[in-house]
C-alpha cells in the first residue's frame, strides 16, 4: 500500500542521513591521511605524525581509532588497491570538502561524485 511505501521511504531517508553524517565526520577527521601513506618495499602509514597534525579536538579519537582493525583495513586497502571505487569515493569526498574552502584556489576534480 501507499502508506507502507511512504514509511519505507522515510526509513530509507533516515538511514541515508545517518550514512551521510558518518561520511562527513570521517571526511573531516581523516582529510589529511594521504600525506602519511608511504608506498614502496614496505608500505606503511605514519599514524603518530598524522595524529600530531590534526585538529586538537580530533586527536583523542584518532589515537584510539588508528589502533582499530577498521582503520587498519582502511589504510591497507589504500596502500594495496587505491583504485577501488570506495577508496576513490572517499578520497574525492575529501577533495570536495577541500574544494569548498575559500583558501583553496586550485580546485581538484571529483568526477566520481558527479
Image (tube, grey):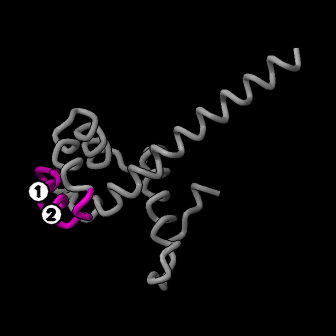
Residue sitting nearer the eye, 82 or 45: 45
Residue 36 within the magenta-colored segment of the rendering: no
Which residue is at 28% across, 58% downward?
A: 33
Real-space Cα separation, disc 1 to disc 2, in angstroms: 6 Å
Q: For mark 2, does the 10 Å Cα neighbourhood hold few (<14), some (14 to 19), or many (20 or more) residues?
A: few
Q: Nearer the viewer, mark 1 or mark 2?
A: 2
Position of 42 with respect to 75 (left or right) is: left
In the depicted structure, whether residue 54 falls above or below residue 26:
below
The residue closer to the viewer here, 75 or 26, is 26
Q: Which residue is mark 2?
A: 52
**Can you say which quadrant of the picture contains the C terminus?**
bottom right
Dots 1, 2 in contact, CB < 8 A: yes
Q: Quadrant of residue 11?
A: top right
In the image shown, does 41 or 30 lie closer to the viewer?
A: 30
Q: Which residues are magenta?
A: 41-57
Residue beneath label 1, please?
Answer: 48
Whether residue 5 sits left or right of residue 77 in the image: it is: right
Amino acid at each position: 500500500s501507499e502508506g507502507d511505501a511512504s514509511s519505507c521511504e522515510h526509513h530509507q531517508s533516515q538511514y541515508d542521513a545517518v550514512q551521510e553524517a558518518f561520511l562527513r565526520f570521517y571526511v573531516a577527521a581523516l582529510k589529511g591521511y594521504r600525506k602519511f601513506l608511504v608506498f614502496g618495499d614496505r608500505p606503511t602509514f605514519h599514524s603518530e605524525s598524522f595524529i600530531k597534525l590534526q585538529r586538537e579536538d580530533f586527536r583523542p579519537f584518532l589515537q584510539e581509532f588508528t589502533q582499530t582493525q577498521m582503520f587498519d583495513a582502511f589504510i591497507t586497502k589504500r596502500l594495496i588497491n587505491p583504485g577501488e571505487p570506495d577508496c576513490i569515493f572517499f578520497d574525492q569526498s575529501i577533495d570536495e570538502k577541500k574544494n569548498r574552502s575559500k583558501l583553496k584556489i586550485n580546485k581538484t576534480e571529483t568526477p566520481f561524485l558527479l
